[in-house]
Amino acid sequence: MYDVKDLIRILLLKNGLSMRKLVQKMNEAGYHEMTIGGFSKMLKTESIKFTKVQEILDFLGYELKVAKKTKGETEKDLELLNV
């Protein structure tokens, strides 16, 4: 399972963008203003807000979908938690 930082980095690579270019283009497109330093810090400290992740995904042309796990996946997770 990826964490948010890895997911964003993968999507940036797939779209041929650096973090700096993403911030610049999102600011130019009218999304909530951010700085490269602030964005980098959010990823580094894993303190990025869900709404910011949604904005980034939207800008890159992706959407976030939530789906219920299948029974086998849920049981596997419970085993990992020793429940």
Image (spheres, rainbow, N blue to C red):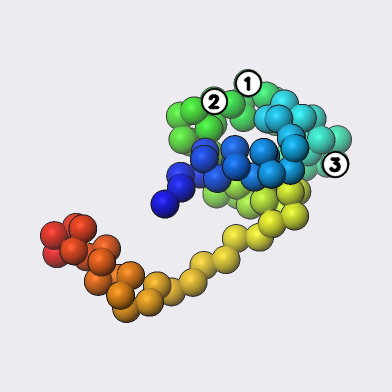
Q: Residue at x 32, y 78 (%)?
A: 71
Tag on residue 1?
Answer: none
Q: Residue furthest left?
A: 82
Vertical comparison of 45 with 60: above or below: above
> Is residue 70 in view from this perspective?
yes
Name above or below for residue 72 compared with residue 80: below
Q: Quadrant of the C terminus?
A: bottom left
Q: On the picture, is 28 further left or further right than 47?
A: right
Residue at 74% x, 43% y: name it.
Answer: 15
In three-dimensional space, the C-alpha distance between marks 1 and 3, rounded to whole angstroms, equals 19 Å
- From the top left corner, tell me how far across and down residue 41 is, in percent: 54, 25
Q: Position of residue 32 (x, y in %)?
A: 73, 39
Mark 2 to mark 3 CA distance (whole Å): 22 Å
Q: Tell me the crowding category of disc 2: few under 14, some 14 to 19, or many 20 or more residues within 10 angstroms, Cα based.
A: few
Numbered tag placed on residue 37 in the rendering = 1
For mark 3, what is the residue?
Answer: 29
Quick one: SS at disc 1? helix
Badge 2 is on which residue?
Answer: 41
The disc, 1 or 3, on the residue closer to the chain's N-terminal end is: 3
